[in-house]
């Protein structure tokens, strides 16, 4: 039998199927892939069987998780279908895949032994689809949630994207206006505060009364012991000479000298009042509980209380905020972490790269052994992420930038060692031969024949690595390796999104500038 | 007078590149070596300046056996032997001037050259050589920015910087078009005639061989198969040429040299 020529998917002149097509189909219905294997498509059969086995395993796992409290296959499946409709889609495609596997077995064993027969790929397409659907379910992919929740997160995202309100701050000063109160009322209640020029003060009316008191007593109506609260006197408070448009907090100082902030019982928050443009406000306050049992009195038997209106007011002009300064300083630290790591990486990787260059190390079995060993070590080091190296370095040297430098240095040695050694391997032997022919000695050959050839790629790779190292150093702080990453994570965890936004901006600007600069420099050398 | 006696080179993989080759080159000769690729031409030239160590035989030059020299003595001998390469072998990322000064390395002290310091005399010599080869204006360009013909002129200049008494040229025009080939070979011819420089040059084109050589040797599979004077080479027939080059050899006519030119053999 002669094959037609020039067919792209030409098969080997294959042997006829071991079993009739109908039997292959039947066997594949029992064990997926078996029919194909007996139909002289062994690899195909194994792949199909392996795919089925792993998909069934994955499905059992995911269905169990979806319905953990149910027993019985039917219950579990129905529950999973109800809770997560994606399982229905998976089941449909799984069924299609199973059926098509039978069809495939039939087609393959029928085609076996005939030349030039393209083998169908639909079964593989179906297998892939089922894998993707399960991946969708495992990955908890939720595009609907992504779109709907995007709206809710917008205020936070806005803070991150435009954080510059926090970039400046104003020096502040605490200003206090007070009014004296007395309990109980006597013939001479505390006097009203004297009006003051320019400085805030409170006028309380009345200046004496009773705090909120509670006692445990017998309720005469129900005849049961219960906690009885007598609300305190309502005091009308007016504030004068406060800074306009700055919130005022109301504090109490009880007779024992303890301070506490006035709680607004309706909203259960600290009470804040906003003065008008003249710095005036008025508010009615219920005299709260004294804290503790002791009510200290003066010689007249009066407990002296004080009302305070506290205001944090801006003084002077704006200044750079602490957060901006911190982000800036840490960004500098970050850049230097990257720089120092590159510096050490270059120094240490140059000798290593000579050991990892095949053209230099293939002289004999021993040096070749060193070559393979060094290459192996470099590959291992390189495959471990700098973040993991940082965690290891922190164990040794503790938190801080040095740990970050160590981690990035280790990774740089491996990465640069490989790149440098490849640059050495691609040296043109021609110029070296020519310099040798002039009667130059070994040092001169290296200086005039080798160095000019490896300097440009070395410089290019070094700048490339510097670029990578600074990018890496921005995140190495996440595990405690110093730099801006550390404070970035702190801010995010404390919901300080604006501050975090400042850090993100700094990182973005630095990386962008660096990207541009390194590309420019490298272009000159390549 | 260069005398090659029973020169043999066997590479580590067992290839016998040269087999018992003997010939002599009187001073002032323009000796052309012809032969197929792989016939041992390059190996022969590189044995003379010991870029390749011969397995056996003697290379007597000025009463010294170059084959036995080691270390400092070898480097001193190499200084007097310039070499020009098919692919120019310039340090492409260095300037033309630096490439020329490389030719003085054998004479200069090691440590100043590590800092790229060369004596005033060396620099003047470099400029004079550039002027002689007509590439003064290229001095500060990187070698890779030059055209092929210019690069080969830099290659010759570098060899000239060595004050050579012998010039080895390994297919110096194989990478160039016919017009440039003539120009480069004319430079070599001038050096041969004016400076009385002995030249050993391997070539592929029979026409160029007939035009420039003063004597010719032919190599085939490491054996010396032909030795002829200028007169003999002028009368050489295609059949004789084929005994050296093999059946696929084609003679190039003079007309084809001006237009498209094919090599005598395919490499």
Image (cartoon, coloured by chain):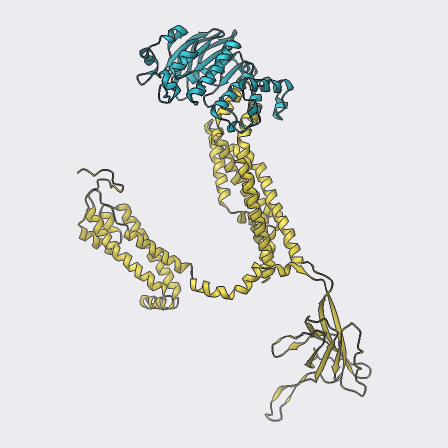
A210 or B250: nearer the eye?
A: B250
Give the colour of chain B: cyan
Decide if residue A73 is on the left or right side of residue B24.
Answer: left
A455 or A222: nearer the eye?
A: A455
Observer able to see residue A58 = yes
When asked about the image quadrant of residue A496, the answer is: bottom right
Q: Residue furthest bottom?
A: A221
Observer able to see residue A396 = no
Decide if residue A271 is on the left or right side of residue B179.
Answer: right
When asked about the image quadrant of residue A256, the answer is: bottom right
Q: Residue A53 appears at what percent x and percent y?
A: 32, 54
Quadrant for the N terminus of chain A, please. top left
Q: Residue furthest right?
A: A299
A498 versus A223 height, above or below: above
When asked about the image quadrant of residue A491, the answer is: bottom right
Decide if residue A186 is on the left or right side of residue A121.
Answer: right
B156 versus A70 height, above or below: above
Decide if residue A440 is on the left or right side of residue B242.
Answer: right
B133 versus A184 height, above or below: above
Q: The chain coloured yellow carries which letter?
A: A
Q: Residue A149 appears at what percent x and percent y?
A: 48, 65
* Residue drawn at point x = 54 percent, y = 35 percent: A525
Count of marks overlaid on the render:
0
* Residue drawn at point x = 78 percent, y = 72 percent: A198
B223 versus A54 height, above or below: above
Q: Residue B66 appears at what percent x and percent y?
A: 50, 12
Q: Residue A123 appears at what percent x and percent y?
A: 28, 53
A162 or B138: nearer the eye?
A: B138
């Amino acid at each position: 039998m002669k094959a037609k020529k020039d067919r792209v998917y030409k098969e080997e002149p294959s042997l006829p199927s071991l079993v009739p097509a109908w039997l292959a189909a039947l066997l594949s219905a029992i064990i997926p892939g078996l029919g194909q294997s007996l139909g002289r498509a062994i690899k195909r059969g194994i792949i199909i069987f392996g795919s089925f086995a792993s998909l069934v395993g994955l499905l059992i796992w995911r269905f169990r998780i979806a319905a953990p409290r149910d027993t019985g296959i039917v219950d579990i499946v129905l529950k999973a279908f109800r809770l997560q409709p994606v399982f229905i889609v998976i089941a449909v495609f799984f069924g299609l895949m199973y059926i098509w596997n039978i069809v495939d077995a039939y087609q393959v064993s029928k085609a076996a032994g005939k030349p030039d027969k393209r083998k169908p790929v639909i079964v593989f397409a179906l297998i892939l689809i089922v894998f993707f659907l399960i991946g969708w379910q495992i990955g908890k992919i939720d595009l609907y949630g992504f779109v709907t929740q995007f709206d809710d997160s917008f205020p936070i995202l806005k803070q991150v994207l435009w954080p510059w309100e926090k970039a400046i701050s104003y020096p502040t000063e605490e200003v206090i206006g007070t009014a004296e109160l007395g309990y109980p009322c006597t013939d001479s209640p505390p006097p009203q505060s004297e009006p003051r020029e320019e400085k805030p003060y409170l006028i309380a009316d009345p200046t004496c009364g009773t705090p909120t008191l509670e006692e445990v007593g017998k309720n005469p109506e129900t005849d049961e012991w219960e906690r009885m609260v007598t609300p305190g006197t309502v005091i009308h408070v007016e504030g004068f000479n406060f800074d306009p448009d700055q919130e005022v907090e109301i504090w109490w100082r009880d007779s024992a000298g303890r301070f506490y902030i006035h709680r607004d019982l309706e909203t259960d928050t600290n009470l804040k009042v906003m003065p008008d443009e003249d710095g005036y406000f008025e508010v009615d306050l219920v005299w709260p509980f004294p804290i503790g049992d002791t009510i200290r009195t003066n010689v007249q038997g009066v407990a002296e209380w004080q009302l305070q209106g506290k205001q944090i007011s801006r003084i002077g002009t704006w200044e750079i905020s602490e957060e901006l300064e911190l982000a800036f300083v840490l960004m500098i630290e970050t850049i230097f972490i990257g720089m120092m790591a590159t510096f050490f990486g270059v120094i240490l990787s140059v000798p290593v790269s000579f050991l990892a260059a095949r053209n230099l190390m293939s002289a004999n079995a021993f040096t070749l052994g060193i070559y393979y060993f060094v290459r192996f070590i470099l590959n291992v080091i390189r495959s471990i992420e700098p973040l993991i190296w940082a965690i290891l370095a922190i164990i040794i040297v503790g938190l801080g930038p040095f740990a970050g430098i160590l981690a990035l240095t280790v990774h740089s040695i491996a990465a640069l060692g490989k790149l440098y050694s490849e640059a050495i391997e691609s040296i043109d032997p021609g110029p070296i031969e020519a310099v040798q022919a002039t009667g130059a000695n070994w040092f001169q050959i290296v200086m005039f024949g080798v160095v000019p050839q490896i300097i440009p790629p070395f410089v290019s790779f070094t700048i490339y690595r510097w670029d990578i190292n600074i990018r890496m150093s921005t995140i190495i702080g996440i595990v405690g390796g110093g730099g801006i990453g550390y404070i970035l994570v702190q801010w995010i965890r404390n919901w300080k999104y604006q501050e975090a936004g400042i850090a993100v901006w700094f990182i973005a600007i630095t990386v962008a500038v660096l990207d541009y600069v390194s590309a420019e420099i490298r272009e000159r050398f390549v | 007078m260069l005398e090659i006696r029973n020169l043999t080179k066997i590479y580590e993989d067992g290839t016998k590149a040269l087999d018992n080759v003997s010939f002599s080159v009187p001073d002032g000769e323009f000796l052309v070596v012809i032969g197929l690729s792989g016939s041992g031409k390059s190996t022969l030239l590189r044995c003379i300046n010991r870029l390749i160590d011969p397995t056996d035989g003697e290379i007597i030059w000025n009463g010294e056996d170059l084959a036995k020299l080691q270390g400092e003595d070898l480097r001193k001998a190499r200084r007097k032997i310039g070499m020009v390469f098919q692919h120019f072998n310039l340090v492409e990322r260095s300037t033309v001037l630096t490439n020329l000064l490389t030719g003085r390395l054998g004479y200069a002290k090691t440590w100043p050259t590590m800092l790229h310091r060369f004596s005033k005399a060396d620099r003047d010599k470099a400029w004079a050589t550039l002027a002689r080869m007509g590439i003064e204006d290229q001095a500060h360009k990187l070698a890779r920015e030059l055209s092929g013909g210019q690069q080969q002129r830099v290659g010759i200049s570098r060899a000239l910087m060595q004050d050579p008494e012998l010039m080895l040229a390994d297919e110096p025009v194989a990478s160039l078009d016919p017009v440039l080939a003539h120009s480069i070979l004319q430079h070599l011819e001038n050096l041969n005639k004016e400076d009385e420089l002995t030249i050993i040059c391997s070539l592929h084109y029979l026409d160029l061989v007939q035009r420039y050589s003063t004597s010719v040797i032919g190599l085939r599979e490491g054996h010396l198969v032909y030795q002829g004077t200028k007169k003999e080479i002028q009368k050489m027939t295609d059949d004789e040429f084929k005994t050296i080059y093999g059946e696929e050899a084609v003679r190039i006519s003079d007309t084809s040299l001006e237009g498209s030119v094919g090599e005598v053999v395919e490499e």
